[in-house]
Amino acid sequence: MKAICFVDDQEDERNRAEKFLGERFTFGTGSTLDEALKDLESKGASKPDLFLMDMYFPEGATDAQNPLKELNEARCQLLKAETRFYEVLARLRQTAEGGFREARKARERFSAPVVFFTRKGTIDNAIRAYDSEKAAAVLKKPDPSPNEAAKASAEELAGLYDKAFEDNASSIAASLEDEIHKSKWYVRHRKLIGSFLMGVASSALVAWLGK
């Protein structure tokens, strides 16, 4: 059975993973890497086959009386807001299918990498972009700070988006240049080229020594 080291600061998340995936994998869980590795070792696995990592962890002490309850309440509010947002998108007939369709057309005609650049995309969209649509990357369009956006009118948001893009232009350009570089033939086939050249050099050396 494959061993997974799952690091998550919330015990309920760790319990869910073991409850619903425990028959398929050996789970070592903990709120830190060392805790998870120790738990995995106690279950007979010498090393993990995969590290599964949560992303958000508390940094320092909090004055919240019930952090999990507060977090869940905020999550409910977020989910309701997201539901409202995607209801508006649906009413405006905006879906990810259009972007995926155009990406497939691009891949059929050219060998250049496809990078999705989105503000509305969900995690599910990103997973599909990588797995099914063979995207080289999914980049998030820059947003203004939540504080600025909360105070702005719908008309003022366009200016805030302009500023956010301008502030992040260098990092966006670097990401795009990196994807272009990685897609170059010689980069994608660097190992093959190296092996070929080594083979040629070896053959030439053997031929020379045989003279």
Image (tube, rainbow, N blue to C red):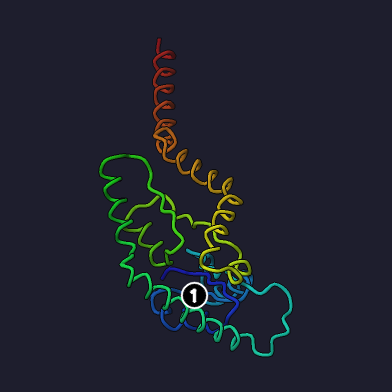
Is 174 situated above or below 202? Answer: below
Is 155 situated above or below 63? Answer: above
Q: Quick one: 178 or 197, which is closer to the camera?
A: 178
The residue lying at 61 percent from left, 76 percent from top is: 31
Where on the picture, by quarter, is residue 209?
Answer: top left
Taking the view exactly as shown, the residue that stands out farthest to the top is: 211
Q: Position of residue 30 (x, y in %)?
A: 59, 76
The residue lying at 51 percent from left, 79 percent from top is: 78
Q: Amino acid at mark 1?
A: Phe
The residue lying at 62 percent from left, 66 percent from top is: 148
Is 208 situated above or below 185? Answer: above
Is 100 situated above or below 149? Answer: above
Q: Quick one: 51 or 185, which is closer to the camera?
A: 185
Q: Is residue 45 left or right of residue 133?
A: right
Q: Position of residue 91 (x, y in %)?
A: 32, 72
Q: Position of residue 179 (x, y in %)?
A: 46, 44
Q: Is residue 67 left or right of residue 95?
A: right
Q: Is residue 186 left or right of residue 14?
A: left
Q: Quadrant of the N terminus?
A: bottom left
Q: Quadrant of the C terminus?
A: top left
Classify mark 1: residues with Cα within 10 Å, few (<14), some (14-19) or many (20+).
many
Q: Quick one: 91 or 153, which is closer to the camera?
A: 153
Q: Secondary structure at mark 1?
A: strand
From the image, tell me which residue sits under label 1: 27
Callout count: 1
